[in-house]
Image: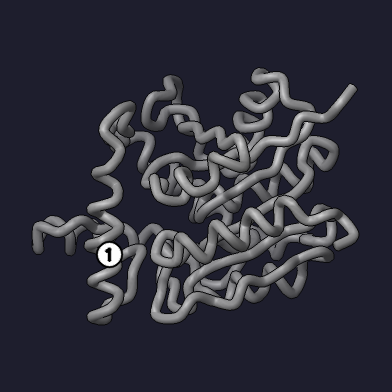
C-alpha cells in the first residue's frame, strides 16, 4: 500500500494566508484547530503531550499513514512530541519559532504574552505586532503588512479563543518550559528549523539549540531583523526553502 504524505500544521490560529497559498499548488496542506480552539469543540488540554495525542488521533482519523509536520511556536512543541512518540507516522518535520522542552526562556512566555496583550489594549494595537515582530521601523512595517494579509481570509475565519482555553494553552507552554531538557536524539526524522534572529517569545537560541541537537537537524539561517513571526515576514523565502526540504530525497 502506498504511503500518503501530507503537510499538517499543528496550529492554525494566526496562520499566514500567503504561506498557505504558495504551498498548496505543490503540497496538500491541512490546517486544524486544536481541541477547544477556534472551530474545534471540547476542552483544551493543559499539557503539550495531550495536545500531541489529539493531533495524532486527528491525523489517523483522516486515514493518513504518514505525514509531514509543520509546527509553529506551541505547534512546534506538539510536533516534537509526535515525531518522537510516533516515528512511523512522521516522515519530515519543519519547526518554526519554537524550542525543546526545558529550553531557555520558554517558561517566561506566559508573563511576556500577558504583558504584551495589556500593551495592545492600552495602545489599541494588535498584540501580535509586539509578540511576533521586532520593535524597529522595519519590524513595525512588516507587522502592519502581516496584519493586512490576515484580512485576506474572508471565510472560515478563526473564532476568538475563550479565556479558559487561553489559560490552558499558557499553562501547557509554561509546563513545557519547566520540563527537564528533552532527549532530542529520539527524533530521527529530517527536521528543518527556522526562526527570526530576535524572537522574544521563544528566544532564538532555542532554534540554534534544536538544529544542533537534532540528529538530522537542518538550520535555516536566522532571518534578520525578525522575531517570532519570522516565517511570516520572510514568507517567500521560507516557503521556497520548506518545499525544497520536503521534496528532497532522504539521502540528498
- Give the color scheme: rainbow, by chain, secondary structure or one colour: one colour
x and y, in percent, of residue 99 in the image: 59, 63
x and y, in percent, of residue 229 in the image: 41, 62
Q: Is residue 114 visible?
A: no
Left or right: residue 173 versus residue 49 is left
Circle 1 residues within 10 Å: few <14, some 14–19, many ≥20? many
Nearer to me, 202 or 13: 13
Residue 90 vs 99, above or below: the answer is above
**Quadrant into which the N terminus falls:** top right
Residue 56: name its quadrant: top right
Residue 225 vs 44, above or below: the answer is below
The residue that label 1 is drawn on is 143
Residue 68 vs 42, above or below: the answer is below
- Identity of the residue drawn at 67% across and 73% down: 209
Describe the element under mark 1 as helix, strand or loop: helix
Q: Is residue 136 visible?
A: yes
Residue 246 vs 98, above or below: the answer is above
x and y, in percent, of residue 90 in the image: 76, 41
x and y, in percent, of residue 30 in the image: 55, 33
- Identity of the residue drawn at 41% across and 59% down: 232
Left or right: residue 17 versus residue 238 is left
Nearer to me, 18 or 99: 18
Left or right: residue 95 versus residue 226 is right
- Identity of the residue drawn at 38% across and 24% down: 39
- Identity of the residue drawn at 51% across and 47% down: 172
Nearer to me, 127 or 168: 127
**Quadrant into which the C terminus falls:** bottom right
Left or right: residue 194 versus residue 61 is left
Nearer to me, 209 or 17: 17
Amino acid at each position: 500500500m502506498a504511503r500518503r504524505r501530507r503537510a499538517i500544521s499543528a496550529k492554525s490560529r494566526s496562520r499566514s494566508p500567503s504561506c498557505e497559498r504558495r504551498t498548496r499548488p505543490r503540497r496538500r496542506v491541512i490546517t486544524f484547530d486544536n481541541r477547544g480552539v477556534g472551530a474545534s469543540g471540547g476542552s483544551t488540554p493543559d499539557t503539550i503531550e495531550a495536545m500531541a495525542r489529539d493531533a495524532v488521533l486527528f491525523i489517523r482519523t483522516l486515514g493518513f499513514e504518514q505525514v509531514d509536520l509543520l509546527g509553529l511556536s506551541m505547534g512546534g512543541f506538539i510536533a516534537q512530541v509526535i515525531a518522537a512518540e510516533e516515528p512511523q507516522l512522521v516522515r519530515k518535520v519543519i519547526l518554526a519559532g519554537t524550542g525543546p522542552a526545558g529550553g531557555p526562556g520558554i517558561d517566561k512566555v506566559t508573563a511576556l504574552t500577558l504583558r504584551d496583550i495589556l500593551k495592545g489594549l492600552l495602545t489599541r494595537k494588535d498584540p501580535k505586532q509586539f509578540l511576533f515582530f521586532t520593535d524597529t521601523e522595519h519590524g513595525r512595517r512588516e507587522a502592519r503588512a502581516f496584519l493586512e494579509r490576515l484580512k485576506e481570509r474572508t471565510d472560515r475565519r478563526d473564532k476568538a479563543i475563550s479565556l479558559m482555553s487561553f489559560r490552558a494553552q499558557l499553562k501547557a507552554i509554561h509546563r513545557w518550559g519547566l520540563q527537564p531538557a528533552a532527549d532530542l536524539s529520539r527524533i530521527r526524522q529530517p527536521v528543518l528549523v527556522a526562526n527570526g534572529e530576535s524572537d522574544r517569545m521563544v528566544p532564538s537560541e532555542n532554534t540554534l539549540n534544536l538544529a544542533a541537537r537534532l540528529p538530522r537537524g537542518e538550520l535555516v539561517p536566522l532571518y534578520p531583523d525578525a522575531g517570532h513571526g519570522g516565517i511570516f515576514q520572510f514568507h517567500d523565502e521560507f516557503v521556497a526553502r520548506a518545499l525544497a526540504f520536503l521534496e528532497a530525497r532522504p539521502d540528498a
